[in-house]
Image (cartoon, grey):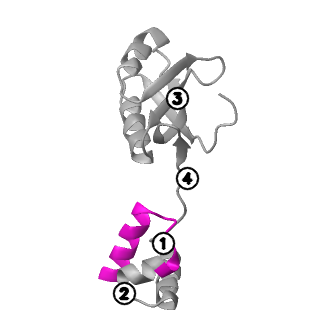
Amino acid sequence: MDERDRLLLMLLRRDARRSIVDLARAINLSRSATQERLARLQTTGAIRGFTIVERSEGGDSQSAYLTLGFHPSYRCAQIVPKLKDIPGVALIHSVTGETDVIIRVDGQSIADIERCRSAIAAVPGIATVATSVVLDKHLG
């Protein structure tokens, strides 16, 4: 990976929807050479997918639902107060079944969601955390 590849990746991190022509201009290469670089970066795994960012009226935001399982000797009364203090936690529900609690976390980015998830997973008594990122809101 050379300097132009690193610059191309930086530009895509900032705006993944930039046109090939715009990217080519920014890295001082032809459109076809830029497309070849993008294809190579995908083949080598430097570019692995696409990011979905949920837009809201107040700006960019991202949400995820986390399902938590507790260690057998722990109860909601011991864990929920600690969860309420974690920045990004927007909703906490106790539920029936194998899952003990469902939480909605909100942030400005996936990195915010991951920081919140890590903080939640570090709470004593939490045995499992499964994360589902919100792709689109259809109601509510």
What type is the residue that disc 2 sits on?
Asn
Q: Earlier in the sequence, mark 1 or mark 3?
A: 1
Q: Nearer the viewer, residue 28 or 107?
A: 28
Q: Mark 1 and 2 residues: CB-CB less than 8 Å, in contact?
A: no
18 versus 87 height, above or below? below
Q: Mark 3 and 4 residues: CB-CB less than 8 Å, in contact?
A: no
Q: Main secondary structure of the magenta part?
A: helix
Q: CA distance from mark 1 to mark 3?
A: 31 Å
Q: Which mark lies nearer to you, 3 or 2?
A: 2
Q: Mark 3 and 2 residues: CB-CB less than 8 Å, in contact?
A: no
Q: Which residues are magenta?
A: 1-21
Check disc 4 and report its element: helix, strand or loop.
loop
Mark 1 lies on residue: 45
Q: Nearer the viewer, residue 136 or 92?
A: 136
Is residue 22 in view from this perspective?
A: yes
**Residue at 47% across / 25% down in the picture?**
90
